[in-house]
């Protein structure tokens, strides 16, 4: 069972957030939530579920859109003064950092991101969102608006009994290094870019 450990303040370029640490003793992983404002209000909470991407989030990699999505989510939450980002330690769609580098090498040879994961013996997406429920419960969130392009996240939250009011698109700019990556996300993983009505 996920355990809450401690909270503190987190001053950022987007304003002051609170940071909350959680531990999953069964998988040996630590996860965090960063929040702004009153998450326990009855109003739907703007939420981003963000899986760790060291290369994109910290190193500024152009191979993905992860770092830009994280910063844009923080900016949007800061703009309205209320929201949460659940930052899950499941690098490389759940295959880990070193295996992600191995997958990058296969992509350099022509594979797309799904093919690379499968050639390494993994599923296309190994992430587990079950830990989101206790995190949101700890924060007091009853209803969420989720910033995502990934319908799988919405389905996962609903299956966990979380009321998803709507989806808020979160699209980063493409560049020559991530065009194939974004195309694969749309074509093979069902990601939706733009509004649902488009």
Image: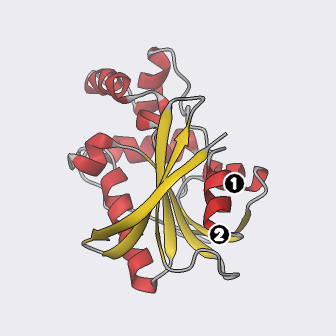
**Residue farthest along the front direction in this orientation:** 6
Work out which quarter of the rendered image holds the N terminus and state it. top right
Residue labelled with disc 1? 157
Gap between marks 2 and 1, in whole Å? 9 Å
> Looking at the image, do the residues carrying marks 2 and 1 touch, with CB atoms under 8 Å apart?
yes
Position of residue 89 relative to residue 94, above or below, is below
Viewer-proximal residue among 48 and 61: 48
Q: Is residue 54 left or right of residue 131?
A: left
Instruction: Answer with the quarter of the image where residue 17 lies.
Output: bottom left
Position of residue 66 relative to residue 2, above or below, is below
Circle 2 SS class: strand
The spot of residue 22 in percent (x, y) is: 52, 48
Residue that appears at 48% across and 55% down: 6
Q: Is residue 114 left or right of residue 140?
A: left
Task: Tell me the tag on residue 106.
Answer: none
Position of residue 154 relative to residue 105, above or below, is below
Can residue 112 be seen here? The reply is: yes
Can residue 50 be seen here? The reply is: no
Circle 1 SS class: helix
The spot of residue 89 in percent (x, y) is: 45, 40
The spot of residue 77 in percent (x, y) is: 44, 75
Residue that appears at 64% across and 60% down: 138
Viewer-proximal residue among 35 and 23: 23
Q: Say whether disc 2 or disc 1 marks the residue closer to the N-terminus.
A: 2
Q: Residues within 10 Å of mark 2 (few under 14, many from 20)?
A: many
The spot of residue 191 in percent (x, y) is: 54, 51
Residue labelled with disc 2? 144
Q: Is residue 50 left or right of residue 150?
A: left
């Amino acid at each position: 069972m996920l355990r809450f450990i401690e909270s503190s303040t987190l001053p950022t370029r987007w304003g002051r957030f609170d940071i909350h640490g959680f531990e999953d003793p069964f998988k040996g992983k630590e996860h965090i939530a960063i929040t702004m404002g009153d998450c326990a209000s009855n109003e739907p909470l703007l939420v981003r579920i963000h899986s760790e991407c060291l290369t994109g989030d910290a190193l500024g990699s152009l191979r993905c859109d992860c770092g830009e999505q994280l910063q844009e989510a923080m900016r949007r939450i800061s703009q309205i003064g209320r929201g949460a980002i659940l930052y899950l330690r499941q690098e490389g769609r759940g295959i880990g950092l070193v295996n992600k580098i191995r997958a990058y090498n296969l992509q350099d040879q022509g594979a797309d991101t799904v093919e690379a994961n499968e050639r390494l013996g993994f599923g296309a997406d190994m992430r587990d969102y079950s830990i989101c429920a206790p995190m949101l419960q700890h924060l007091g969130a009853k209803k969420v608006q989720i910033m995502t392009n990934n319908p799988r996240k919405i389905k996962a939250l609903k299956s966990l009994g979380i009321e998803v009011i709507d989806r808020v698109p979160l699209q980063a700019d493409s560049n020559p290094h991530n065009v194939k990556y974004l195309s694969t996300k749309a074509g093979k993983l069902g990601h939706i870019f733009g509004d649902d009505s488009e």
